Image: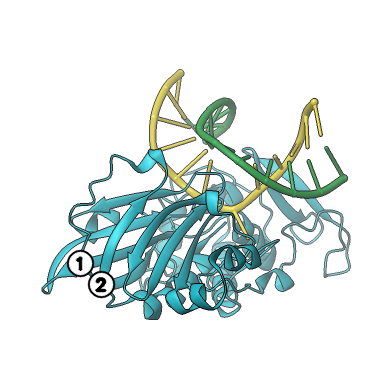
Chain colours: A cyan, B green, C yellow
DNA sequence: ACCCTCCTGTCA
DNA sequence: TGACAGGAGGGT
């Protein structure tokens, strides 16, 4: 499900919900997680909730000594849902799940906290949970687009030494973190750059446009709490609204908003790319 | 630099 | 029944 704006939305909402709460216990309901070392978690207190790349990283401590961090990656179908105790008392738990179109059997892990539980739902089971004694373990290699160092100049440097198509390059988390299939398409449309263009052939002007579009598209998506297609995504079970602003993604055969023709869908490295072949020469 | 795979569900 | 789905690690 999530790219940077969706993960950022989840983290911003989750932080006040679970920040400074004590962890009673962690339940791992998927056999894929059975080897995780969880002994440091029980009884610890949550001291930070942050986004690192597309991961949600929860740091925990005991008596102000940092004990470690949990990193959750939602991959394609993961959801992190905060279920306060009042909510499960007022409505029954099955009712709450149905309202959020979640199935109990897709709950893969649960952090029981004072005041509620944080549930990790993941239909396709691509999502990951990692535990480390330090959050630094989870720092991504790629640059975060919202880091101060992400300038047009730095972007140009990152792009060098590659011949990849720019759409494919934008998905590379080892270079720049956070962009996924939706926003790669939207960024290139905003910059009027053809997704098949090799990054080696981007003009300085185009590099500037893609850089600026990256920031403007991601910012706009965050302001709208991300993109939601069929069901909800954030930790409260609320909908993002950026899907109303998508210009090309998931709009095959629809008219380009420029009035020049229709949106095309093609496959690049096995993933759909949507673009306007007229606007993005 | 590419292809496949992990898994489950939905839609045409 | 097959194509496709917001991701990315591993193998070639």
The x, y position of residue A215, in whole percent, is 53, 72
The x, y position of residue A253, in whole percent, is 87, 54
The x, y position of residue A20, in whole percent, is 27, 78
- Quadrant in the picture for the C terminus of chain A: bottom right
Q: Nearer the viewer, residue A190 or A32?
A: A32
The residue tagged 2 is A22
- The chain that hosts pointer 1 is A
Q: Nearer the viewer, residue A108 or A202?
A: A108
Label annotation for residue A246: none
Badges 2 and 1: C-beta atoms under 8 Å apart? yes
The residue tagged 1 is A44
Residue at image position (50%, 72%) is: A88
Establish if C7 lies above or below A32: below
- Quadrant in the picture for the N terminus of chain A: bottom right
- The chain that hosts pointer 2 is A
Q: Nearer the viewer, residue A85 or A278?
A: A85
* Disc 1 element: loop
Instruction: Tell me how many marks there are.
Output: 2
Are the numbered discs 2 and 1 placed on the same chain, yes or no? yes
Residue at image position (58%, 68%) is: A96
């Amino acid at each position: 499900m999530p790219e940077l704006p969706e993960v950022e939305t989840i983290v911003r909402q989750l932080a006040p919900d679970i920040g400074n709460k004590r962890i009673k216990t962690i339940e791992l309901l998927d056999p894929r997680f059975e080897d995780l070392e969880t002994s440091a978690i029980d009884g610890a207190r949550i001291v930070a909730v942050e986004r690192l790349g597309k991961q949600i990283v929860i740091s925990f401590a005991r008596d102000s000594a940092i004990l470690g961090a949990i990193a959750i990656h939602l991959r394609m179908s993961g959801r992190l849902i905060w279920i306060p105790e009042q909510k499960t008392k007022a409505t029954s738990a099955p009712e709450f799940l149905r309202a959020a179109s979640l199935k109990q059997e897709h709950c893969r892990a649960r952090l029981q906290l004072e005041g509620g539980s944080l549930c990790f739902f993941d239909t396709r089971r691509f999502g990951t949970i990692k535990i480390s004694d330090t959050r630094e373990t989870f720092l991504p290699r790629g640059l975060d687009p919202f880091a101060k160092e992400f300038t047009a100049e730095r972007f140009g440097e990152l792009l060098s030494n590659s011949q990849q198509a720019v759409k494919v390059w934008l998905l590379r988390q080892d270079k720049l973190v956070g962009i996924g299939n939706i926003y790669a398409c939207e960024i290139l449309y905003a910059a009027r750059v053809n997704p098949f263009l090799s990054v080696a052939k981007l003009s300085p002007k185009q590099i500037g446009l893609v850089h600026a579009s990256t920031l403007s598209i991601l910012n706009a998506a965050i302001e709208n709490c991300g993109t939601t297609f069929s069901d909800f995504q954030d930790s409260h079970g609320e909908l993002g609204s950026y899907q109303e602003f998508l210009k090309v993604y998931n709009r095959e055969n629809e008219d380009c908003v420029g009035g020049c023709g229709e949106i095309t869908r093609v496959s690049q490295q096995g993933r759909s790319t949507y673009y306007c072949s007229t606007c993005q020469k």
